[in-house]
Amino acid sequence: NAVWLSSRHVQVVPASIGVSIVSPTNESQLCLGRSWEINLALNDPVGLFDRAEVFVDGVSLGQTTNVTTGWMPPQAGDYTLTARAFDAQGQAYDFSPPVTVHVAAAPAPEIVLTTLPEGATNELTGVPLLVVAQASVAAPARIQSVEFFNDGQSVAEFTNTPFLLPFIATNPGPHVLAARAVSDCGTFADSNPIEMVTTLQLEVVWEAIQSG
């Protein structure tokens, strides 16, 4: 009996590394005054990745063995981000699809200071008064911190909402309360001042008078 052997042509696809920029996303709005993370995603089925190189408008930010690198925009405008990967032998692979970002001047926060109960300006020393700061800022910036002041001296700082200060005056007299909101882009704004007067608590002692 004859045995027939057949052959097949197998096409071998060279191994490669695919890279893409996953953040910031295309058409993202960024602000000046802070560093932004550029994060990469790899398609590397056989583990060839050794390092990556990120470019802004064709200018290299340097090479990194991580998939994250930082970038601080130098000025407002539109920028194109790209990246490519290298293996351990220095072979460079295809550039990532371009990502366009729009960088603008950082917006200033807005902050309003109130008290609870609302409008309270006369308090007793040692009695807490709740001071409330309502702070906001336009995207892409975020509120990073709110700092409270009493007579120009810092008394507390908060990084998470709600921005509430239980203020307790320890000495009688006039006081000025204020707050400052700072964004993660480095801009800040000061609140309206609240002028208040605190007075000493009066302690009344009742004495039982016994005759005889």
Image (spheres, rainbow, N blue to C red):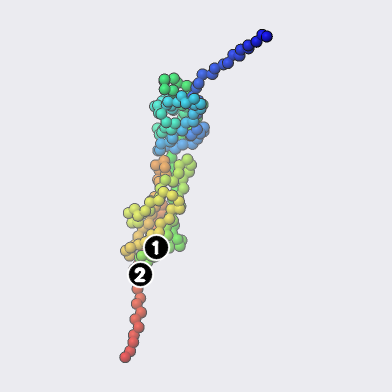
Task: Compare marks 1 and 2 and give the one earlier in the sequence.
Answer: 1
**Tally of numbered discs:** 2
The residue indicated by pointer 2 is: 201
Q: Residue at (42%, 26%) from the top-left corner?
A: 51
Q: Is residue 8 among the parts visible in the rendering?
A: yes
155, 195: nearer the viewer:
155
The residue indicated by pointer 1 is: 128
Q: Residue at (36%, 65%) from the top-left corner?
A: 126
Q: Residue at (40%, 26%) from the top-left corner?
A: 63
**Vertical comparison of 101 with 179: above or below:** above
Mark 1 closeness class: few <14, some 14–19, many ≥20 residues within 10 Å: few
**Vertical comparison of 13 with 112: above or below:** above
Alpha carbon separation for disc pair 1 and 2: 13 Å
Residue projecting furthest to the right: 1
Q: Where is residue 52 in the image (x, y as percent from the top left)?
A: 43, 26
Q: Position of residue 164 (x, y in %)?
A: 43, 55
